[in-house]
Image (cartoon, grey):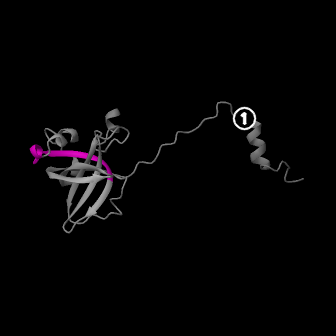
C-alpha cells in the first residue's frame, strides 16, 4: 500500500545518469568533468536571457526519489543551466524549484556579491519546473473544548447578542 504513495519522476528527468557526481565533486575540477552527464536540481536564483540561449542560475539542493529538490536541507553550491532558446523570466522566476538533466559543458566565473564564484555550466537536455509547495498548516485541536450547550446557545441565538429572536 505504501508503494502506491511513492511518485515517479517526470519523463523529462526520469533517467538517472550512471555515475551522477555531486556539485562539490564537479566544482573541484570543472575542466576534468566536461562531458559528464548530471541530474541536478534546486531553486532558481537568477535568469539571464542571451541572444540564442537562456542561462538560469540555480542554487543546488539534493534531489528526492521523484527528482524534486529537497530544499529542507543545506545547499552545496550553485550552477548554471543553459537552455537553448528563450525562457520567460516570469515563468522561471526566482524561488521556483527546477530539476535539469544535462551535460557539463564548461565553466564561467561570476560574482556573487563581491565573491568570485566558478559556476559549472550544464547544457540542458531535459528539465522539469516544479510548482511551489504550499505550506502545510496542521489542524489545531482544543484539548479542553467547551460543553455542548455553549455551541447550542451561540449558534441558536447568535454571538455576541444573547437574546432570543422572540424577545
Is residue 42 located in the magenta-colored stretch of the structure?
Answer: yes
The image quadrant that residue 17 belongs to is top left
Give percent across and percent down for residue 2. Answer: 35, 33
Name the quarter where the N terminus is drawn. Answer: top left
User: Which residue extends farthest front?
Assistant: 114
Q: Is residue 132 left or right of residue 107?
A: right
The residue range painted magenta reads: 31-44
Residue pointed to by mark 1: 146
Residue sitting at x 14%, y 42%: 29
User: Is residue 30 in sight in this rendering?
Assistant: yes
Name, please, the residue furthest toward the right: 167
Q: Looking at the picture, does residue 144 appear above or below residue 161?
A: above
Q: Residue at x 64, y 34 (%)?
A: 142
Q: Residue furthest top?
A: 143
- Residue 103 in the image: state x and y as whole percent: 14, 50
Q: Position of residue 31 (x, y in %)?
A: 11, 46
Does the image show residue 11?
no
- Number of numbered discs: 1
**Residue ID at (28%, 51%):** 58
Does dot 1 land on a helix, a strand or a loop?
A: loop
On whether residue 80 falls in the magenta region, the answer is no
- Horizontal side of 104 relative to 8 (left or right) equals left
**Residue 124 location, quadrant:** bottom left
Give the x, y percent position of residue 107. 16, 51
Q: Is residue 162 left or right of residue 132?
A: right
Amino acid at each position: 500500500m505504501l508503494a502506491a504513495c511513492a511518485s515517479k519522476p517526470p519523463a523529462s528527468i526520469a533517467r538517472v545518469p550512471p555515475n551522477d557526481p555531486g556539485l562539490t565533486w564537479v566544482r573541484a575540477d570543472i575542466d576534468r568533468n566536461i562531458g559528464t552527464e548530471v541530474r541536478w536540481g534546486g531553486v532558481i536564483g537568477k535568469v539571464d536571457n542571451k541572444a540564442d540561449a537562456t542561462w538560469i542560475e540555480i542554487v543546488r539542493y539534493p534531489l528526492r526519489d521523484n527528482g524534486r529538490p529537497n530544499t529542507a536541507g543545506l545547499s552545496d553550491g550553485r550552477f548554471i543551466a543553459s537552455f537553448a532558446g528563450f525562457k520567460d523570466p516570469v515563468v522561471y522566476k526566482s524561488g521556483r524549484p527546477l530539476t535539469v538533466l544535462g551535460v557539463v559543458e564548461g565553466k564561467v566565473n561570476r560574482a556573487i556579491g563581491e565573491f568570485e564564484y566558478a559556476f559549472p555550466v550544464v547544457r540542458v537536455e531535459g528539465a522539469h519546473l516544479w510548482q511551489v509547495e504550499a505550506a502545510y498548516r496542521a489542524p489545531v485541536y482544543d484539548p479542553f473544548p467547551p460543553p455542548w450547550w455553549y455551541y447550542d446557545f451561540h449558534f441558536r441565538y447568535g454571538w455576541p447578542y444573547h437574546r432570543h429572536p422572540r424577545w
